[in-house]
Image (cartoon, rainbow, N blue to C red):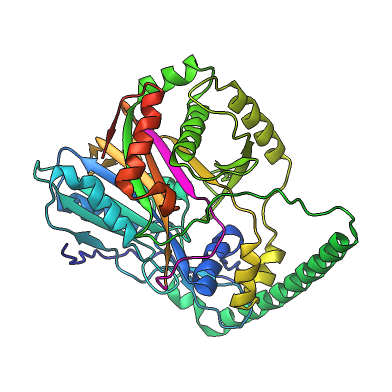
């Protein structure tokens, strides 16, 4: 695949001005979690969107799409700090938008091409571009476009909003790179560094109190742990599957089994786990992605969380979905009042932890066996490029280890995503336990068997 970058000019956003008390947009909360993962542990997460356009709008349309995106919130970078301990700051990226054009491929190779682009993704917003476009054409004159975005600068919904904003011609106001220089930036970092030191102290004291309380408690730690095989996040060992399902058949099937599209999706994913033979403990722990994003003024890069479903593995499907509906209602109600966000004080402590200490702490963090993400109905502004709606569309993400070694971090052994558009639902599956999921062809066979058991015709990419 050739890789000439077609760049377009970036509009200059209004420079931050005004008094010294102007707030500095800091990389904080969930956004900083991704930054710390990259800087301290050496891995990052890339999100992929892929469009298949039956009518080719031309390379010019793809380049215009890149230019439009470069005026929005995706086009930000992580700026330097002038004072140790201060949070990093968001800046407008100085990088030119990139469009990487590849050699023509056979139509039957679209899925494999998209897989390879995702596996090779290496985006570092703290050092370079946070996103890029890849494109190619097929032997049947179709256009395929891939958008890769670092999870550090956007979650799935933030990307959707950025694409809609690009279609509407909106320009995001981001600080210029020069705003991170000079005496004003130094003073702002000094103030923030002092705040972070105080926050780290509060977090350390809270951690000590918690440890003492646990030692005084006579309640023994549970011995029945989870028996699932440990996942690996080497992108070239992950098994990747993309499959299209008829949208009407999907919802009719869910209704016939007393469920919803969401509960059917969860049941199908659980079925893939069981058919793969992955060992499961007393509970199959499923993390359901939820959005916590507010209105248009909410410009956080990441504003999502996860509701955990703890499923009795004795429940097997196809069958009645009432159990999952009741379990989901209870879990979502509990989540709404639980306050599960990680406090910023804790991240201030993590920021100063040595890498080895942080790595050891992470290994003790409980992780789900499975993660599921339903992006709902695709906005038509997101579906189209150059006025041409995609006949096929996918979204998914993949963790990449910067050092090329297996990651020893908590995470799901299987992740799935679905999105609805037109007459279809596209489901993507990523398996991270090679000894059970095998290669992509083996996992596709398992996914196909599960869909067939539900009476759902399907077509693999």
- Asked if residue 409 lies in the magenta stretch, the reply is yes
Q: Depth check: give the residue in front, 350 or 195.
A: 350
Q: Quadrant of the C terminus?
A: top left
For residue 284, side relative to residue 333 (left or right):
left
Please give the name of the residue rendered at 21% of the width and 66% of the height, measured from the top-left corner: 5
Badge count: 0
Q: Is residue 154 above or below residue 363?
A: above
**In the figure, residue 178 lies in which quadrant?**
bottom left
For residue 77, side relative to residue 284 (left or right):
left
Q: Depth check: give the residue in front, 412 or 101.
A: 412
Q: Depth check: give the residue in front, 378 or 273.
A: 273
> Could you tell me residue 432's position as x and y percent?
44, 53
Residue 315 appearing in the image: yes
Please give the name of the residue rendered at 17% of the width and 67% of the height, measured from the top-left corner: 4
Q: Is residue 362 above or below residue 321?
A: below
Please give the name of the residue rendered at 37% of the width and 45% of the height, measured from the top-left corner: 395
Region rendered in magenta: 403-421
Residue 67 appearing in the image: no
Please give the name of the residue rendered at 27% of the width and 44% of the height, measured from the top-left corner: 51
- Asked if residue 102 lies in the magenta stretch, the reply is no
């Amino acid at each position: 695949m050739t890789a000439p970058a077609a760049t377009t000019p970036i509009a200059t956003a209004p420079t931050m001005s005004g008094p010294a008390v102007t707030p500095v947009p800091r990389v904080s909360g969930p956004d900083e979690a991704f930054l710390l993962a990259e800087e301290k542990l050496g891995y990052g997460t890339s999100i992929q969107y892929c469009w298949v356009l039956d009518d080719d709008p031309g390379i010019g349309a793809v380049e215009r799409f890149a230019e439009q995106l470069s005026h929005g919130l995706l086009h930000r970078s992580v700026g330097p700090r002038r004072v140790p301990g201060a949070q990093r700051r968001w800046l407008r990226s100085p990088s030119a938008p990139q469009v990487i054009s590849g050699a023509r491929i056979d139509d039957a190779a679209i899925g494999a091409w998209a897989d390879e682009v995702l596996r090779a993704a290496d985006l570092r917003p703290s050092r370079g571009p946070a996103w890029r476009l890849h494109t190619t054409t097929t032997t049947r004159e179709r256009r395929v476009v891939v958008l890769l975005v670092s999870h550090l600068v956007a979650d799935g919904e933030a990307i959707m909003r950025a694409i809609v904003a690009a279609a509407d011609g909106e320009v995001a106001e981001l600080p210029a790179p020069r705003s991170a220089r000079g005496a004003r930036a130094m003073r702002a970092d000094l103030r923030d560094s002092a705040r972070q030191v105080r926050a780290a102290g509060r977090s350390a004291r809270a951690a000590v109190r918690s440890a003492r309380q646990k030692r005084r408690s006579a309640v023994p730690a549970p011995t029945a742990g989870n028996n699932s095989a440990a996942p690996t996040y080497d992108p070239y060992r992950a098994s990747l599957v993309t499959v299209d399902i008829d949208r009407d058949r999907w919802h009719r099937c869910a209704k016939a089994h007393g469920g919803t599209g969401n509960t059917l999706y969860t049941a199908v994913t659980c079925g893939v786990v069981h058919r793969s033979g992955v060992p499961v403990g007393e509970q199959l722990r499923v993390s359901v992605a939820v959005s916590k994003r507010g209105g248009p003024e909410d410009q956080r890069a990441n504003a999502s969380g996860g509701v955990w479903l703890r499923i009795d593995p004795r429940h097997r499907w196809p069958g009645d979905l009432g159990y999952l509906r009741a379990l989901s209602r209870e879990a979502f109600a509990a989540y709404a009042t639980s306050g599960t966000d990680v406090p910023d004080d804790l991240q201030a402590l993590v920021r100063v932890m040595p890498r080895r200490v942080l790595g050891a702490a992470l290994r003790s963090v409980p992780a789900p066996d499975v993660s599921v993400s339903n992006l709902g109905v695709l906005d038509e502004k997101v579906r189209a490029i150059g006025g041409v709606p995609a006949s096929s569309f996918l979204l998914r993400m993949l963790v990449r280890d910067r050092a090329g070694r297996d990651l020893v971090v908590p995470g799901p052994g299987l992740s799935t995503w679905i999105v609805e558009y037109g007459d279809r639902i596209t489901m993507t599956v990523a398996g991270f336990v090679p000894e059970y999921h095998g290669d992509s062809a083996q996992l596709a066979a398992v996914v196909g068997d599960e869909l067939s058991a539900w009476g759902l015709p399907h077509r693999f990419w």
